[in-house]
Image (tube, coloured by chain):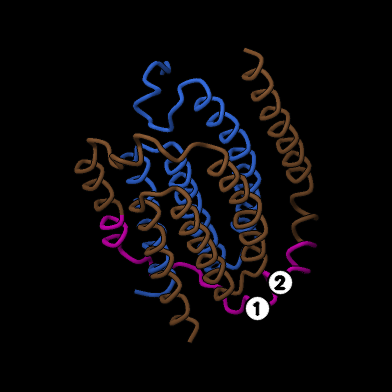
Amino acid sequence: METCFVIFFSTLAVVFAALVVILRQPMRAALALIAHMVSLAAIYAALNVHVVAIFQILIYVSAVMVFMVYTIMLLDDRDTSYRQRFSRWVYPALAVAVLIPVSLWLLPANPGAVVAPALADRFSFASFALDFMKTYWFHFELATVLLLIGVLSAWTAVKEGLNG
Amino acid sequence: MDKYQFLITMAGVLFSLGLLGVAVRRNLLVVMMCLEIMLNAVVLSFVTSASRSGTLAGTSMTFFIYVAASCEIALAMAIVVLLVKRHGSLDLDAHQDLKG
C-alpha cells in the first residue's frame, strides 16, 4: 500500500514539474509548482518522515511560494518571454535531461546496503526535535544567523536599487 | 527495483526537469521556479537516503536546505524586481549586459 502511494505521488510530482517547464503563464506555472511540492510532501509522509513533510508544506508551499506569487502579481505579464517560451538550447538541454535519469536507472543496486528495520518513531516530530537539538544545536543557531543575513541582504538590495 | 532506488531515480528525473527548465525557459520567474524543482529533487534524495538508513543526518540536512532556500528566494525575488525595473522585461535576453 505504501509503495502504491509513493508511486502515485511520484507520478504526480513529475507531471506537475513538467507542467512548470511547459506552461506559458508564470502564475499557472506557480500553481503547478505548489501542486508538485504538495505531492512531494505526500511522498515524505508515506515514507514516515513526517517532520520533512510538515517543513515542506510550512516553508516551501507557504513561505517560498507566497514570495513567488507576490512577485508575479507585482510584475507586468505582457512580456516577450511569454510569446517565445523557449531558448535555442532546447535540444541539447533535452539530451542532457534524458541522460541524467537514464544513468541513475542503470546504476547497479547495492545489495549490502543497510536498510532500517522500523522508522515509525524515529522521524516523529518529538523524537526528531529532541535528537536535532542535541546534535545540531550549533548548526541551528548558524541557520538563524543565515536567515537574518538573508533578510538584511534583500532589504539592502531593494534599498540600494531604488536609490541608484 | 526497490522503493528507494525508484525514489532516487525519481529525484534524478525531477533534477533533470529542473535543469531543462533553467536551460530552455526565457522567463526569469519560471527559471527561479525550475531552480526550486532542482532543490526539491536534492531534498527528495536526502530524505530517501535517511529513510533507508534510519539516520538523522539526511533529515537534518533537509532542514538546512530549507533555510538556504528561504534566503535564496528572498534575495532572488528582490534582485528580479530590480532587474525588471531597470530593463523593463522578464526576458533573459534583455539582461545580456550583465557580466559573468
Which residue lies under the disc numbered 2?
A124
The C terminus of chain A: image quadrant: top right
**Chain coloured brown in the rendered structure:** A
In the rendered image of the structure, the colour used to display chain B is blue
* Residue B33 in magenta stretch: no
At horizontal 60% and vertical 68% (from top left) the residue drawn is B54
**Residue farthest to the top?**
A164
Say left or right for A97 vs A160: left
Chain ID, mark 2: A
Relative to residue B63, is residue B7 depicted above or below? Answer: below
Relative to residue A157, is residue A129 depicted above or below? Answer: below
x then y, percent, for residue B50: 56, 63
Q: The disc labelled 1 sits on which kind of residue?
A: Ala
* Quarter holding residue A81: top left
Helix, strand or loop under label 2: loop
Bin the neighbour count of mark 2 within 10 Å (Cα to Cα): few under 14, some 14-19, many 20 and up. some
x then y, percent, for residue B66: 62, 49
At horizontal 38% and vertical 66% (from top left) the residue drawn is A110
The residue lying toward the viewer, choosing from A93 and A82, is: A82
Q: Which residues are magenta?
A: A101-130
Relative to residue A12, is residue B44 depicted above or below? Answer: above
Chain ID, mark 1: A
The residue lying toward the viewer, choosing from B17 and A50, is: B17
At horizontal 28% and vertical 49% (from top left) the residue drawn is A97
Say left or right for B72 vs B17: right
Circles 2, 1 touching at the beta carbon (< 8 Å): yes
The residue lying toward the viewer, choosing from A90 and B4, is: A90
At horizontal 38% and vertical 32% (from top left) the residue drawn is B91
Which residue lies under the disc numbered 1?
A120
